[in-house]
Amino acid sequence: MTASPLPRWDLTAAYPGVDSPEFEAGFAAARGAVAGLAALFDRHGVGVEDSSAPDAVTAAVFDEVLAAYNAALEQTSILSAYLFCLLAADSRDADARARESELEPTRVALERLGTRFARWTATLDLDGLLKQSAAAREHAYPLRQARERARHLMPPGEEALAAELRTAPAWARLYGEVTSQMTVALERAGRTERMPMTAIRNLGYDPDRDLRRRAHEAELHAWPEAAPALAAALYGIKHETQVLARRRGWGSALEESFFLNGIDRGTFEAMHDAARERIPGFRRYFRLKARALGVERLAWYDQFAPLGGAGRSWEYGEATAFILDRFGNYSDRLRDFAERAFRERWIDAEPRPGKSGVSFSWRLRPGEPRILVNFKPSLIGTIILAHELGHGYHEHRLGGRTALASVTPETLAETASIFCETLVRRAALPEAGPEEELAILEDSLQGSAQRVVAMTGRFLFEERVFERLRKRALSADELCALMLETQRETYGDALDPDTLHPYLWAAKAPLFMPDLAYYNYPYVFGLLFALGLTARYERDPEAFRAQYDELLSGTGSADAATLAARFGIDLRSPEFWRAGLATIDAEIDRYEALVG
């Protein structure tokens, strides 16, 4: 029987196309909204040095400013999301690329108005406004966050100068240009071919161990030529981040990241300590995988080697039916969302040239995400689809919130995706044969190891880079030495030390993101928080269901500790984090039985 064609998503709910009158009208409206917002800010003295005294701002003025700010954020967000989705579906779309470039000045102007808005909030009698204004009460948390941000702003002239002199985005572009153009020589099938670095790294997933080894060695041979330029780029980005954090009154770039991620140091330390104490359990998993592969010790290039059998083919229709059934066992709301996503073509599942290889869910309009996957007809492909539908459900639950009240920090962004993925994976395990069960567990443990072991190592690396940059720039060789140091510290003797990856810092684009320091520990948080919630669900399903949707809809309206407390969870207690890690230990026990 011929499989049905895989779906492509429908974006026309936003605009019919970039050349349509509707898009032109939306583009003009967004520009007008931002320009109008600037005029409104000027009229009411929002965020200027001689702004009105706090008691001069009435609830009516506050409501007008807040509504206009949310409207400008929403209109610009829809345009940005639409163009982002077009380019993710086809990177060769020159018209979408051009319009994205045209939109950039409007986005920059809106970002600067956001700084003015934050500065203004610090002048307001917020307690008085919360009593008088329903809109203020709806935005209590983002307003308090804005006030804290304002407390850490430099004087307006210095902020304007810092914005004009900022170099981190240019360093990030340099990184992207250098790494995207790198090619690596690899001998295959009796001939040498040059392959993009991304393709070389993807060979780490190949079942042929000799090919994985040769690809790894070829990659390590290629990085030294680019490394000096990339070390300079890393210095430019991290030095700027560190200087601005210090000038804005943060104790460190790490302290600023806690604020941006909605957690405090006590929460971080409880999570981080629990993760580090369980790393030996992951080393046990690595040793078991080595046994399954028939090697004495796992090499770096063996981490993503496939194990187990794929089992039967899961065509897209079977995958969606299985997901709907399992989601329905949890709640009607979750199933209804997935049904709508399938029915209204919110999902782009067809692999094709020019399409992004990264799976994601993206907010197109309030409550209406779009989901991109490259579906493979397998159980693993089904689990990936369930994961992204979880992200989509989270966006859906935020649909009733304004743009300002629906900004979710990275720490909470994985909550629903991992929960939904876990629902489907655990439902599939009893129906799988031993080989398919091994493949499912390998996929799960591989992902958990990357989030806990690898991300912990990258956190340690970034922390030590910041520490050393207080004194001077670091050479590429020094960065490689630091990377090897943290790999030995986290992987221990579970990996062959002669195969470690000293240039991993150069291969990881998130390290070079200009606006994101510490793009690592939030993934540890996301995994363990979701697993901890899953454990709560399994102990008391009815109580959990009653609170879970409220938690998802509130991730932009409260910090992580406040949301967790509604479940009776203390995020500063290591025991909560240990409970999530215990579920991974149970998977390793079953994995051992299968490979033993």
Image: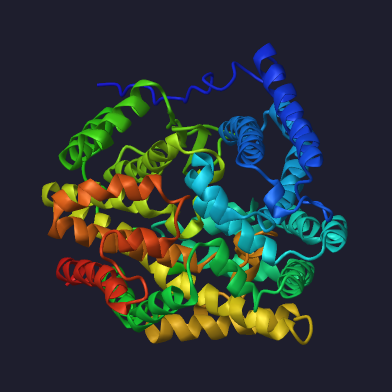
Query: In the rendering, at what x and y percent does residue 60 appear?
Result: 62, 36
Task: State the residue in front, 550 or 122.
Answer: 122
Task: State the residue in front, 18 or 29.
Answer: 29
Instruction: In the displayed orientation, state which residue is furthest to the top.
Output: 21
Residue 347: name its quadrant. top left
Count numbered badges in the picture: 0
Q: Is residue 545 left or right of residue 509?
A: left
Q: Relative to residue 83, is residue 529 depicted above or below?
A: below
Q: Is residue 321 left or right of residue 416?
A: left
Q: Relative to residue 97, is residue 520 depicted above or below?
A: below
> How is this picture coloured?
rainbow
Residue 308: name its quadrant. bottom left
Query: In the rendering, at what x and y percent does residue 189 appear?
Result: 53, 53
Q: Quadrant of the C terminus?
A: bottom left
Residue at horizontal 45%, vertical 74%?
268
Query: In the rendering, at what x and y percent does residue 206 appear?
Result: 43, 56
Query: In the rendering, at what x and y percent does residue 5 appear?
Result: 38, 22
The answer to whether residue 503 is visible is no
The answer to whether residue 405 is visible is yes
Q: Relative to residue 175, is residue 1 depicted above or below?
A: above
Residue at horizontal 69%, vertical 53%?
54
